[in-house]
Image: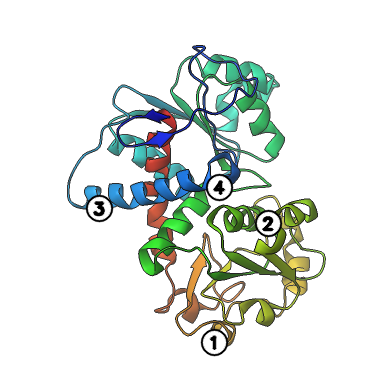
Amino acid sequence: MIDSGKWSFAPIANTGCTTRNSWFMARHFLTISDLQPAELVQLIERAITLKNRHKAGLRDEFMRGKTLGMIFTKSSTRTRTSFEAAVTQAGGNSLFLAPQDSQLARGEPVEDTARVMSRMVDAIVIRTDKHSMIQNFAAESLVPVINGLTDDFHPCQILADIQTWFEHRGNIQGETISWIGDGCNVCHSWMKAAVAFDFTLKVATPKGYEPDEALAAACGDHVVIGNDPYAAAAGASGVITDTWAGMGQEFEKEQRLADFAGFQVDQQLMDAASNTAIFMHCLPAYRGVEVAADVIDGPRSVVWDEAENRLHAQKALLEFLLA
């Protein structure tokens, strides 16, 4: 068991990745499954502590002398802002590479970029399309690689979501949560979270928009998938949705608007959930489309706490991975 003062965790088995030193194996965060359940709970609790310390005007400088590299091939508001602010608040520096700023745009192999860049920075956040790209990058990286979003998963968003739940409702274990809408990358990460944090996720999507079948099977009875939003919301402690047309799906917008008719989270749907149910959305949100304005702007919505908690959850994640 390794004890770094703030974090305690067992060494993980060698996965074949190249390392700077034989005693150090870089831990990556590509999906929720990359951390053990106990580590995830510890990370959420640490995020809440860091948030409280920040609001009290206290500084935590675990990034002093360290640099975070960021490679984003997709647009971003919350992910980029929260990571850059987290590093600054923790005493470090960050550098940002857009598609046109790196040799990746000219066809340099992902693996070569990883081998070079990871010798120059202390951790790397990647936001891209194919999940296989970030897997290939991590396999050659000497430093922790963090998934800032891929087409398959968005684990950093879930850390903020679970932190928000802990703050408003306490431990999420044993709860029933409802996902309404597209079986997208955020839904996939919530499915993995259901297993890791031991709660039930009821997913309702239009037919043809269900989440990945293999992932659903691997989640067992932690995840229930159907096509009836009211059945999924019934008695739930929390209701979650996302945009119906994500990045790269804009050309499908008109078709999706038709296919998702009846899946808007409005007051009637919220009333089907528990009378203490909270509403969550990873943003950006489109009022009058996937969510009614009086829901997202109403008293049961915690979306602005979710957005803020991206900063604190990711700060805790960086501290953990660099411990």
Toward which corner of the image does residue 127 lie, by quadrant?
A: top right
Where is residue 41? Give x, y as percent. 44, 50
Give the SS element for disc 1: helix
* Observer-nearest of 24 and 20: 24
Mark 2 vs mark 4, CA separation in Å: 12 Å
Query: The residue under label 3 is which amino acid type?
Result: Asn
Quadrant for the C terminus in the image? top left
Give the SS element for disc 4: helix
* Observer-nearest of 42 and 126: 42
Mark 2 vs mark 3, CA separation in Å: 32 Å
Query: The residue under label 2 is which amino acid type?
Result: Cys
Q: Are marks 1 and 3 in contact (CB under 8 Å)?
A: no
Residue drawn at the location 35% of the way across and 41% of the way down? 85
Quadrant for the N terminus in the image? top left
Toward which corner of the image does residue 81 lie, by quadrant?
A: top left
Mark 1 vs mark 4, CA separation in Å: 29 Å
In primary-sequence order, the first of circles 2 and 3 is 3
In primary-sequence order, the first of circles 1 and 3 is 3
Toward which corner of the image does residue 230 lie, by quadrant?
A: bottom right
Mark 2 vs mark 1, CA separation in Å: 25 Å
Give the SS element for disc 2: loop
Rendered position, 318 above or below 21: below
Where is residue 208? Give x, y as percent. 82, 64
Label placed on residue 184: 2
Dot 2 crowding, Cα within 10 Å, few <14, some 14–19, many 20+: many
**Which residue is denoted by mark 3 in the rendering?**
52
Q: Are marks 2 and 4 in contact (CB under 8 Å)?
A: no
Q: How many marks?
A: 4
